[in-house]
Image (spheres, grey):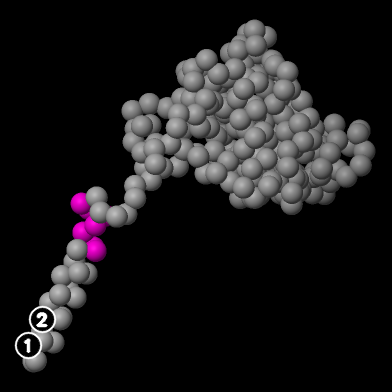
Amino acid sequence: MDPTSALDRRRALSALGAAALCPLVGGPVSARPAEPARPGHSPSLGPGEAWRLLRKGNEYWVGDRLRHPDQSSAHRHRLAEAQHPFAVVVTCIDSRLSPEIVFDQGIGDLFVVRTGAHTLDDLVTGSIEYGPLQDGTPLIVVLGHQRCGAVSAAVSALDGGRRAPGHLADVVEALRPAVTEARRAGGDLVEATVRAQITRTVAVLEHDPALASRVGSGRLGLVGAYYELGTGRLNVLRTKGFTP
């Protein structure tokens, strides 16, 4: 090999090695700035403030301006020992309705409880109660959505007089009161049932023995909201415990 070519090769390899080491030794690659503390993690946060944080996050989602807060490795390390979410979101299992996305939140911001059409039983209700009772979480949001598949399946089963397969039959039975209420209201039965299920779920939580005193004193707020799949917007159907 020509001595000049060999020298040039060694210089090139040396330069590549130095470039590879830059991130390790604090070279020209800039570090991600630390995230500022967000008011959502304050223990004094009230229901109204918590709801305004979620509404603002939804505006970012609707406007295609997501900020992706609280998703850094630094924030992950801060939360390793403790968490203090500022809201509980009770919603459907639908893949188009991920609370951290539609509210533009990150890790540690939300307790999320998901069942088909946000149906309740004792275990689910206990999971919802955890945030307010154990961590002082000031807000519960019941989030239903447009064209809910669980509601459509329930309406179809009840209209056809047939039993849904497996434990889907339990979801159908849990939705039966909302379907009955929606029939009286008229209009599109599926969409009316979704709305009825939202307001009925809020009412159940409002009168839950473990939560009622918190709602009555204003320490805990409840919001029932309907989510539009196409636009990403929220329509508030019912609130309790605070003024939005």
Residue displayed at 57% across by 28% down: 88
Is there any visible trace of residue 93 in the rendered image? no
The correct choice, above or below, for 77 with respect to 19 in the image is above
Depth check: give the residue in front, 84 or 175.
84
Residue displayed at 64% across by 50% down: 64
How far is the residue under mark 1 from the one under mark 2?
A: 6 Å
Q: Which residue is mark 2?
A: 7
Is there any visible trace of residue 191 in the rendered image? yes
Quarter residue 168 falls in: top right
Mark 1 Cα within 10 Å, few/some/many (few <14, many 20+)?
few
The correct choice, above or below, for 112 with respect to 152 in the image is above
Depth check: give the residue in front, 238 or 57.
57
Residue displayed at 56% across by 34% down: 113
Q: Are marks 1 and 2 in contact (CB under 8 Å)?
A: yes
Which quarter of the rendering shows the C terminus?
A: top right
Q: Which mark is residue 3?
A: 1
The correct choice, above or below, for 197 with respect to 218 in the image is below
- Point out the stretch of residues depicted in magenta: 19-25
Name the magenta segment's main secondary structure.
Answer: helix
Residue 22 magenta: yes
Residue 20 magenta: yes
